[in-house]
Image: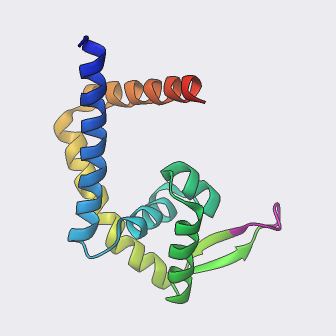
């Protein structure tokens, strides 16, 4: 086995572990990982379209739709027709939705910031650059 075989195992192991830890974090905060991810996108990342959420997280569109419908039913979001694309709706958090999103997103951001502070700026910048390059090359070569 050459080094690349070992690197592939290690990369997959650490990315799967990270995904698992985010899911575990959500569960420990009494929310599904899908709700956590969607609230994160709406509140912290400013993403407000179902298709974008599904594409960025690689989530099935039907799953995103189901979660969005449940959040809408609870009064956490409004669905506003998109003037640019009549088939699409813009997702907007209600005042109650902002409170709910903040209860999920703020503790996660605090944890993430502590992790990055402990890693240090230089390592964080290297990590971002490296992961971006890996994703870009993987996308280019796998599609």
Report how many numbered discs are placed on residues in the image.
Answer: 0
Residue at 53% across / 49% down in the picture? 56
**Rendering quarter of residue 101:** bottom left
Q: Is residue 13 left or right of residue 45?
A: left
The quadrant in which the N terminus is found is: top left
The quadrant in which the C terminus is found is: top right
Q: Is residue 39 left or right of residue 115?
A: right
Residue at 24% across / 62% down in the picture? 25
Q: Nearer the viewer, residue 50 or 47?
A: 50
Residue ranking furthest to the left? 118
**Rendering quarter of residue 69:** bottom right
Q: Is residue 141 left or right of residue 5?
A: right
Indicate whether residue 85 is drawn in magenta: yes
Q: Which residues are magenta?
A: 83-89
On screen, 101 above or below 10?
below
What colouring style does the render use?
Answer: rainbow
User: What secondary structure predominates along the stretch shown in magenta?
Assistant: loop
Q: Position of residue 79 (x, y in %)?
A: 66, 77
Residue at 50% across / 27% down in the picture? 138
Q: Position of residue 3 (x, y in %)?
A: 25, 13
């Amino acid at each position: 086995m050459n080094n690349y075989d070992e690197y592939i195992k290690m990369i997959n192991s650490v990315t799967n572990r990270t995904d698992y830890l985010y899911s575990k974090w959500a569960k420990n905060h009494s929310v599904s990982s899908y709700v956590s991810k969607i609230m994160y996108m709406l509140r912290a990342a400013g993403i407000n379209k179902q298709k974008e959420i599904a594409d960025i997280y690689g989530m099935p569109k039907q799953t995103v739709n189901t979660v969005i419908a449940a959040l809408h039913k609870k009064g956490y979001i409004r669905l506003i027709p998109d003037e640019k694309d009549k088939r699409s709706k813009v997702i907007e958090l209600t005042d109650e939705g902002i409170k709910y999103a903040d209860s999920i997103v703020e503790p996660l951001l605090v944890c993430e910031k502590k992790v990055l502070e402990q890693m240090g700026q230089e390592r964080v910048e290297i990590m971002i650059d490296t992961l971006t390059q890996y994703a870009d090359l993987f996308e280019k070569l796998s599609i």
